[in-house]
Image (cartoon, helix red, strand yellow):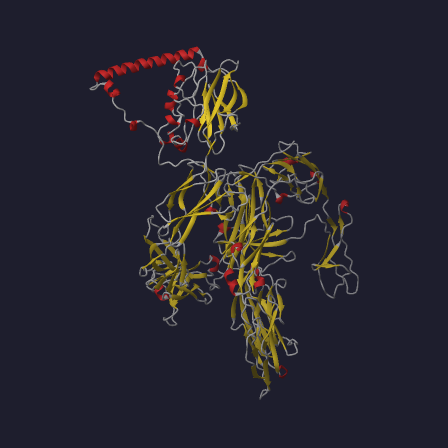
Amino acid sequence: MAHTQRQQVGGRGQCSSRLFPLLLLLLPFAAQPGQAAIHIPSNFKRPPVITTQPESVTVFSVEDLVMSCEATGNPPPIFRWTKDGEEFDPGSDPELKVSQQSGSFVFYTLSNTMDTLKQYQGKYVCYASNELGTAVSNEAILKTDVPPTQQKERKVHMKSEQGNSIVLKCNPPQSSMKPIIHWMDRGLHHIELSQRVVSGKDGNLYFAHLTAEDSKDDYTCNVQYLATRTILAKEPITLTVTPSNSVVRNKRPQMMRPTGSHSTYHALKGQTLELECIVQGLPTPDVSWLRKDGELSESRTVKDMFDRRLLFSNISETDGGEYQCRANNSQGKVTHTYTVIVEAAPYWTKEPVSQLYAPGETVKLDCQADGIPPPMISWTINGIPISGQCTDPHAHTHNLVSSGSLILNDVTFGDTAIYQCRASNKHGTILTNTNVYVIELPPQILTEDGNTYTFTEGQKALLECETFGSPKPKVICGTTSSLLADPRVNPLTNGGLEIYNVTHSDEGFYTCAVQNTNLSVSAELEVLNRTVIVSPPQALKVQPGTTAIFTCLAIVDPKLGSPLIQWRKDGLKLFENVYVSDASFFFAFCIFPSLLDSVSPEYVVEFEDQDLKEIGWEELTRVSENKVHARLSLWPYMSYRFRVIAINEVGKSDSSKPSEIHNTLAEAPDRNPEDVRSESTNPNTLVIAWQEMEKHDFSGPDFKYKVMWRKVVGSGPNWHIDYTTAPPFTVSDVGNFSAFEIKVQAVNEKGEGPEPDPVIGYSGEDSPLEPPVDVGVELINSSTIKVTWAAVDRESVRGHLLGYKVQILYLLCRRATEPESPVVLETGANEEKKVISSLTPYSHYTLVMTVFNSKGEGPASEMLSFKTDEGVPGPPMSLMLDSPSETEMTLHWTPPDQPNGVLIGYLLQYQQIVESDDSPMQVVTIDDSAVTHLTLRSLDRHSHYRFYLRGRTAAGDGEPIMQDGATIMNLILPSGWISVPPSNISLSVGENSVNLSWVAKKRHRNVSFQIHYLNKNGNNVYTDIFCCLFCLLSFSLLLYFHPVYYHYTNVHSAFCPFSSEGVTEVQPSFATQGWFIGVVSAIVLLLLILLILCFIKRSKGGKYSVKDKEEGPMDSEARPMKDETFGEYSDLEEKRTASLPSLGEESKLCSEDNLDYNGSSAVTTELNMDESLVSQFSRPSEGPETLHGLPDNSPLNPNNAPPANNGMPNSVTILD
């Protein structure tokens, strides 16, 4: 049986209330190896998925500027870009070339100079969109840099005594690339490095002490840049080592790099960090490394450059702490302490999963990220922030929970979209795209039928049953036993089944079925015996030189085959005979591993802060399987309890019993608050803010912050000091927008934290004091000007100069028009000119400028007045065509709405419309601007024409208005000629009426039509004539009958009949029944009697004669008549007074002889005509001879038509 699916998009995810039915290909659910195939039609559509992200690049040459983005989808996605958050179209930039193929978009530069590339620096984001949503790429940063070049240098000569230390400096050129330094001699041989001679990270060559062999005249620093594939050779350095005048004395170690006794390093998780320890001394000191707050991990660190460097190749949070370098020689030692602070850019701990959902379900998109500092989570839908989504009162709501998850309640097809989760902190931003598919699909079971699952006794068995469908299929798990009642059995939400502590009694066949369907699969569970060591090795004491035999016997399930016996000594694997050294004791054990047995665990040490018990237990460290103790790094001045949990691949053990409470001693703080800054907003105040420290960083009682500040200029070396317990800290009376050095230090009862580094902050801003000066205006053309000014004094800005505002006010126009709104433009802070376009020509403006900062605008500059030049006019407002005859055309127009100057006339151009487009253009110049119509004669009555009309000023000819048209033809054919009948005749039947509609031919007028109808039994033929005077219209004829059967036979034109037959039957209704007619007649008679009585009573009480009133003159203007009903013969008044011909004889339309008030039958004709049709009735050139077959008293006869409106132009054929 065929299955159906439904899906719609365009609701929460898009700013539209329209729903489009679409099909969707579910790529994330494609069949995996070993899984059943998903039966999805091949014509489903796919949402866009970005397969190649744009990459950050530093451009050193024009060939390096390449930015690409690739995505898949069906339909193929459409690409767009943003640069620094603004829309960016590479295709519209003449300096860039775009290469766009199916599924990819690449742009690169055509420029030949690096200077033009600086404008493209920024952050780029690629968007790939199709009907199902928009995928967003990661941010790609484009930077430009100049390739390092060789600098002219002086030759360096250095001289020192033997035994002294010295540094040869390299000074590589500044560049964004990290250089690789090679010290070589003139023969391109590397300088031999050793513990005594090392190369520093800064590129310099360090000598712990000099020897006579160090004298050379060709120490050359070669700087290599891999990105640009260049090597720069510096000027050779000459080093002369002179013998000492006395015996060379030994020297104790001293630090060369870094200097001092302490330094702090910041690193991001995953990066490489190198700690450097270069020392001088004689003899050459030995260097060793240790971790002060724990064990130095040999697996996570590498020593390099003769132990002078400690390298972390993939640093993590656990590597943060204090490290120490110790340098020793016979004369003493020196130490240097390194504080390593590891922070982290955002990284995902839980990403939302693309999934299928059925209408009405609740969707929860879990998005969790970690980082140091913790990142902020935000959501977008199709690249648009949730706060910017259009709101629909009927749209479902979305909820953001504190964990960062997004919940969509009661989803609909319109919620199908691509949702982006973004995690950001100060170190960066990460983004993931998640597809939400709201769709209906039939259920399927993806897990193969007949699987066999094998587990060992005591393990947790997992039987899989993966299903697919929307809504999500409900799974029923069955077995040959009543195992489901066992508390060890846990049915999973994904359809699987878990059995804890599995036993042989659990063996058997299990069935997984989809509820309310016939879909099911079966699986067999096989349970093996646990491997057991029945005879472990015993402890032995033997004499040296004798043989020690250890025995190890075990029972293994026969299905597993022969076991692999593995021996270990002191935790290390043994593969050969074991020899025991003299007087040595060791522990030996054998292991029988199998793929189904549990592996050895590792241990997790957790702690609980007794002052913050609500947080619960937190992981502190992990210990490998062969250790039973751990050294812990604790925070000072805290109360701890500890517990241990064992973990292996199977799961976690129960926790150990918590330890006793352990209190650490108080210490001085070892760190200071971060993110120290100024948040000053009000004038004359300095607001110092920072990120509050965590409680465990207080390190002791009486914790507070020491706030220090001083002016950058003019305050001397002394600091102002104050204390507070929480940010922010406000200082008053400090002046407007003054620069300060600010520091915040952590302090407690035990002392102060490390000396903080000062940062620069500013006091609050105030409005600017002075306006721009030297403001000038230069006219470029009639609608464009260039404004220039001189830069303002920065001290008068009293804040960060954000730019200038140019305000142009429309003062007076030298023509009649409505006032324009003021033009306000903002410029950059460093701009001193601005080109402004789109002004109105021939107008008078005033201009003022102001300076603005974040507090507002300063005073305005002196008002500057200017006038724009005259320009070409806009197109005339309208152009109407009228045809007095078959060879004449009259043009009526109205002047341009935007003359943009003094109108001096018009230019008319027209030509015949032919297929070859080579018809000559006729030109008529009109020098009088007051002329608004023109008649063209001697036109070809068989041709169509195209007319262009332009206004003219002294500045030139303006834009044209165009109109196509042709003259109207009189369709008067000689006797015997056959005319073309009307087309598209349609018939619409009512209970007592029939509506005939047809379309007349173009450009024909003065045509009449005949409609013949008769009753079904063939008796009594009735004919009605309907006249068409303007044949571009569509006509409708409405005929009213008694409810009997009629048959219309022919539809004629005035010149030749043609046949169009049809039969219509109308069923009689209750309105024709005698009882109903009698009731209605009685009611009408009663109402008539009441009306007569009312009139009699009114005439007796009046003060004037009704007869005089009736005989008085009737004002023709007092008759109500709407403009839109002028000339329409379907008005209600006409219906009440129209002729009612008898059904027993032939009648003509509009004839007085056809009036019949007997009510036995009626034929009423409705004709809808526009005002232009009525104007045709008044032409004296169209006499009665053209209206063949019309009675003299017909309302369609122009002799009886009301006067035409003289202000209305004659009708003309207007081409579509």
Question: Where is residue 779 drawn, in percent x and y?
Answer: 38, 60
Relative height, residue 585 to residue 1145 (above, below): below
Relative depth, front residue between 147 and 665? 147
Question: Where is residue 149 drawn, in percent x and y?
Answer: 56, 72
Relative height, residue 894 to residue 1102 (above, below): below
Can the viewer see residue 660 in this picture? no
Relative height, residue 906 to residue 738 (above, below): above
Q: Residue furthest right?
A: 546
Relative depth, front residue between 1000 and 618? 1000
Q: Residue furthest left?
A: 1103
Side of 563 where 1178 appears, left or right = left
Question: Where is residue 306 drawn, in percent x and y?
Answer: 63, 72
Dividing the image into 4 quarters, which one contains the N terminus? top right
Residue sitting at 61 percent across and 62 percent down?
300
How many marks can you see? Answer: 0
Question: Where is residue 807 drawn, in percent x and y?
Answer: 35, 56
Question: Would you identify the image quadrant in which residue 704 lies?
Answer: bottom left
Question: Would you identify the image quadrant in which residue 962 lies?
Answer: top left
Side of 1148 where 108 appears, left or right = right
Can the viewer see residue 623 in this picture? yes
Q: Residue furthest bottom?
A: 245
